[in-house]
Amino acid sequence: MVKVDEAVVREVDRLLAKVYGDRKWRRHAEPIDELIATVLSQHTNDINRDKAFEQLKRRFPSWEQVLRAPVRKIASAIKPAGLANQKAPRIKAILQRIAEANEGDLSLEFLEEMPTDEALGWLKNLPGVGPKTAACVLLFSFGKPVFPVDTHIFRISKRLGWLDEKVNEAKANELLDQVVPNEIKYRLHLNMIAHGRQICRPQNPRCQECVIKHLCEYFRKRKEAGSI
């Protein structure tokens, strides 16, 4: 259960925007590119994901070629992302489903006209696509008002006390999407990730430098314990 009201979320957004910038939406990538790149990012880091994606696109310049390629060749191309033998058949199955839904056309542009909830549901029905992956596609490729929760946002939200300790990432996507106002979802998503990388790190967080420490349960508890 989320333990935060909208005013607190807006204050965190305001303070992080002063540090990391007022992000305006722009399309990051074509929808299928965004989808496959996010699938590749599962259980790996951004550097390995990017290597795998670039290698895949270099060996197969079109998604039609990926769809026709043997799974073993796809797996070879995406090896830097790890779990290639799991991700390769998943990617091929995703492309097959998109083609079937689109009379053979490999495009996700039809999601633009769908209501957000319906578009999320459609994407989550694809093989291996969970709430975060679906939300990333809709946020970054279409600017739809969704709030993907990655590992940085998940960690910060728990430290702030926005989420119970028992809440998993999949549930966190649903809960935080309900309390983050639509008009700040894009900016807050990017700025929380930046904050997680630079300040609110998994190990040795730089709490004293944090602009939202006065709103953070983790900081309060560390201070009370004398560890800060």
Image (tube, grey):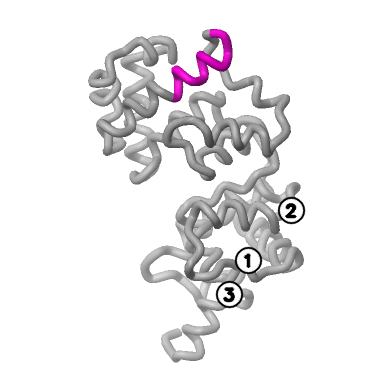
Q: Which mark is residue 181?
A: 2
Marks 1/3 in contact by CB < 8 Å: the verdict is no
SS of the residue under disc 2: loop
Q: Which residue, given by chain and number where applicable, does mark 1 sit on? A: 2
Mark sitting earlier along the chain (2/1): 1
Residue 133, placed above or below residue 21? above
Does the magenta-highlighted stretch encompass residue 5?
A: no
Mark sitting earlier along the chain (2/3): 2
Q: Which residues are magenta?
A: 94-103
SS of the residue under disc 3: loop
Q: Estimate the spatial distance between the alpha carbons at disc 2 and disc 1, rounded to whole Å.
A: 14 Å
Mark sitting earlier along the chain (1/3): 1
**In terms of depth relative to the viewer, which is nearer, 83 or 219?**
83
Residue 183, placed above or below residue 134? below
For label 3, count other residues whose C-alpha is less than 10 Å away and answer few (under 14), some (14-19) or many (20+).
some
Q: Estimate the spatial distance between the alpha carbons at disc 2 and disc 3, rounded to whole Å.
A: 20 Å
For badge 3, the amino acid type reads: Cys
Q: Which residue, given by chain and number where applicable, does mark 3 sit on? A: 216
